[in-house]
Amino acid sequence: MPKARHLLTIDDVTPKQEMFVKMYIENWGTMSKTAIVKEVFGDKDKEMTDTTAAAIGSRLTNRKISPHVCMLIDKLKEQEEKKYSDKLRRHKRFEYMANAAMKKEQFAAAINAEYRSGQIANLFVDQKQITVTGMEGMSRDELEKKLEELSKKIDGHNAKTIEIEQVD
């Protein structure tokens, strides 16, 4: 006798359901549930309609109908998100591009895709050093020295410097 839906666990996932979940996570954001269902559950002799495939994909990802499949999706997605620091879709996209570039032996494009993927994961840090030559970047002591120097130059040209004390 089959188990009640609310009693199903990850151990109750069938091999085809498991294959669906793995493909679903592997192709996250790049392949539709309908296309994955057609590939996993499709019969080689008969072609599955989009409507049927969409219905199956929808049932497999519905927590009320297939809680055990959703548990496996959650588990594998969590593992992938830990691996990619919660930026799964972007990483998968860069991974796809890097693999496609490697197949075509476009090494520069593959390296660039891997580099960008690493940037998302904060594996590469761009360090930029900014030096300010104006007064904005000076410390208080440097500003006082600069003002004193300017005051001496101005006094030589008949200008007057006014000394002010702040009173609270």
Image (spheres, rainbow, N blue to C red):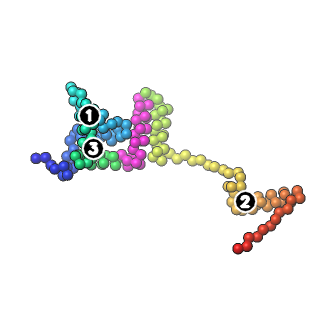
Is 150 included in the stretch rendered in magenta? no
Residue at the location (48% across, 40% down)?
116
Mark number, residue 140: none
Amino acid at pointer 1? Thr
Q: Which residue carries the number 3 mark?
A: 61
Of pointers 3 and 2, the one earlier in the residue sequence: 3
Residue at the location (84% across, 59% down)?
152
Q: Distance between the residues labelled 1 and 3?
A: 16 Å
Q: Which residue carries the number 1 mark?
A: 51
In the image, is residue 130 above or below residue 161?
A: above
Residue at the location (29% across, 40% down)?
22
In x, y percent, where is residue 92?
A: 39, 40
Q: Give the range drawn in magenta.
A: 80-103
Residue at the location (22% across, 29% down)?
43
Is the residue marked by circle 3 packed among few (<14), some (14-19), or many (20+) residues within 10 Å? some
Please identify, in this view, whether the residue under mark 1 or under mark 3 is nearer the observer.
Answer: 1
In x, y percent, where is residue 82?
A: 38, 49
Secondary structure under tag 2 reads helix
Is the residue marked by circle 1 packed among few (<14), some (14-19), or many (20+) residues within 10 Å? few
Secondary structure under tag 3 reads loop
Q: Which residue carries the number 2 mark?
A: 142
Q: Considering the image in quadrants, where does the C terminus appear?
A: bottom right
Q: Are marks 3 and 2 in contact (CB under 8 Å)?
A: no
